[in-house]
Image: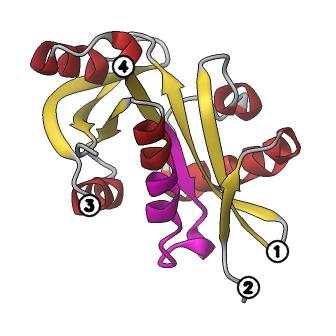
Amino acid sequence: MKSVIIRPFEDTDLAGASAALTEVHGTDGYPVEGVDHPEAWLRPVDVAAAWVGERDVAVVGHVAVMRSRGEDAVTLWMRQSGDGEDRIGVLARLFVVREARRQAVGERLVRAAMRYGREHGLRLVLDVMTKDSAAIRLYERLGWREIGRAPHRYGAGRSIEAVCYVAPEA
């Protein structure tokens, strides 16, 4: 089995990333939204940067840094830090297909996003649903700190509890 490389997202990755997202939704129930239109969910206009994990020309993972859209994690961090919204990025859309797990793909994707945040003077925040315990363990292992909890809203009035985190200082 070839190793996974982490590289910046390219437009030609959209179909493969969409297929991987659909696969992850089927195995893990993540994400709770966006699977009906995965290409639109992966590439909204507020994506600042994104990366993929690739093995044998197949996309096996993805992460993005998004510009703030008023997420609860952004609001919590602004209140706690005094940072302006323009100094905050949102780590989002992290997923790895089951067959590529236990190879540090998720960690390497998150580290790529964290490097981008440092290089661009952004403090990264995120929210993760409490049901996603593996993701929570990953973020905490990488030094992310809980800053509060908020409902993750999706669909027609649905929500699930989420934990909000801030990346460690550079």
In the picture of the structure, the residue carrying the numbered disc 2 is 2
Instruction: Give how far apart the Cα atoms at labels 1 and 4 are.
Output: 36 Å
Instruction: Give how far apart the Cα atoms at labels 2 and 4 are.
Output: 38 Å
Q: Nearer the viewer, residue 66 or 168?
A: 168
Q: Earlier in the sequence, mark 2 or mark 1?
A: 2
In the picture of the structure, the residue carrying the numbered disc 1 is 56
Q: Amino acid at mark 1?
A: Asp
Rendered position, 52 above or below 77: below
Of tags 1 and 4, the one toward the viewer is: 4
Examine the rendering and report whether any part of residue 58 can be seen.
yes
Is the Cβ of the residue at disc 3 closer than 8 Å to that at disc 2? Answer: no
The boundaries of the magenta stretch are 92-112
Q: Amino acid at mark 2?
A: Lys
Instruction: Give how far apart the Cα atoms at labels 1 and 3 are.
Output: 28 Å
Give the label on residue 91, or none.
none
In the picture of the structure, the residue carrying the numbered disc 4 is 87
Give the label on residue 137, or none.
3
